Image: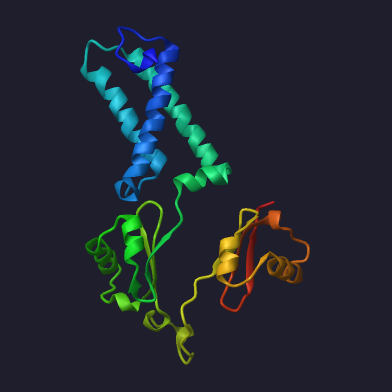
Amino acid sequence: MEFFTSQESLTIVQWMLRAIVGFVFFVLLVKLMGQRSLSQVGLLDFVIVLIIGNIIAHPLSDEGLGLEGSMITMSVILILYIIGIYLSLYSKHFRKWFITDPIPLIENGMINNRNMKRARISLDELQTELRMKNIEDIQKVALALWEHGGKVSIFLKTEHLPLTAATFNKPVKPFYYPNTVIKEGTINYKQLHQIGRDEEWLLKKLQDTYSNITIKDILLAAVDDKENLSIFLYNS
């Protein structure tokens, strides 16, 4: 652990170990800070900008420090960043740690106070988000989701949606957000249970609607309020 303490000089391996430890520590620190600290910036992007900015600042402002150590450190950080991006694209478990599931803040006009604490968003901030979307009454909101990166997605109740040609002379339907039952070739059992269905029902539905398609062929599949199945396949 000599690389961890102050040294007169460090070897290349020790510089690399410092970079790896610093990167992992900073990712954990930012993760603990919560999504509010990230705003519209992704976790990995946020980490890489702050670390590289701090690394390059010291040798540029201190004549007693050389650039070699900083260049090695930044190179290792960049490699770790690229690996992180690659893993987030191809590893579901890794991506799930960096990209959290949406958190419902408002459901059917009712504020979910527990989820607001989870998202670390205050009532004032929630009201600001509503005002920015020209929504003056919380009871008009069917669903508001706290998304990864700090954005709030808001869906109005059907009766409060802007009128279009398609809505004239049609009865008002309750708002329904389609349930994602298959994602990236994997069945989402949690969503299936929410609609009161199981894997056997899904497989039969898939067989009846798309007979030549397997679960692994599907990028995304969703079920609407009438239990119609919509699927999107991987590009061939």
Q: Position of residue 50 (x, y in %)?
A: 31, 34
Q: Position of residue 195 (x, y in %)?
A: 57, 72
Q: Is residue 92 left or right of residue 202?
A: left
Q: Position of residue 166 (x, y in %)?
A: 48, 84
Residue at 66% over, 67% down: 198
Q: Is residue 193 left or right of residue 65?
A: right
Q: Going by the picture, which residue comes out furthest to the right?
A: 212
Q: Going by the picture, which residue comes out furthest to the bottom?
A: 169
Pick whichever, 57 or 139, lies toward us. 139
Quadrant hosting residue 51: top left
Q: Going by the picture, which residue comes out furthest to the top?
A: 8
Residue at 34% over, 56% down: 119
Identify the image's colour scheme: rainbow, by chain, secondary structure or one colour.
Answer: rainbow
Residue at 43% over, 82% down: 164
Quadrant hosting residue 62: top left
Q: Is residue 229 left or right of residue 62?
A: right
Q: Is residue 182 left or right of residue 144?
A: right
Quadrant placement of the N terminus: top left
Q: Position of residue 192 (x, y in %)?
A: 60, 66
The relative height of residue 151 versus residue 9 in the rendered view (above or below) is: below
Labels in figure, total: 0
Residue at 39% over, 39% down: 45
The relative height of residue 177 versus residue 170 in the rendered view (above or below) is: above
Pick whichever, 133 or 103, lies toward us. 103
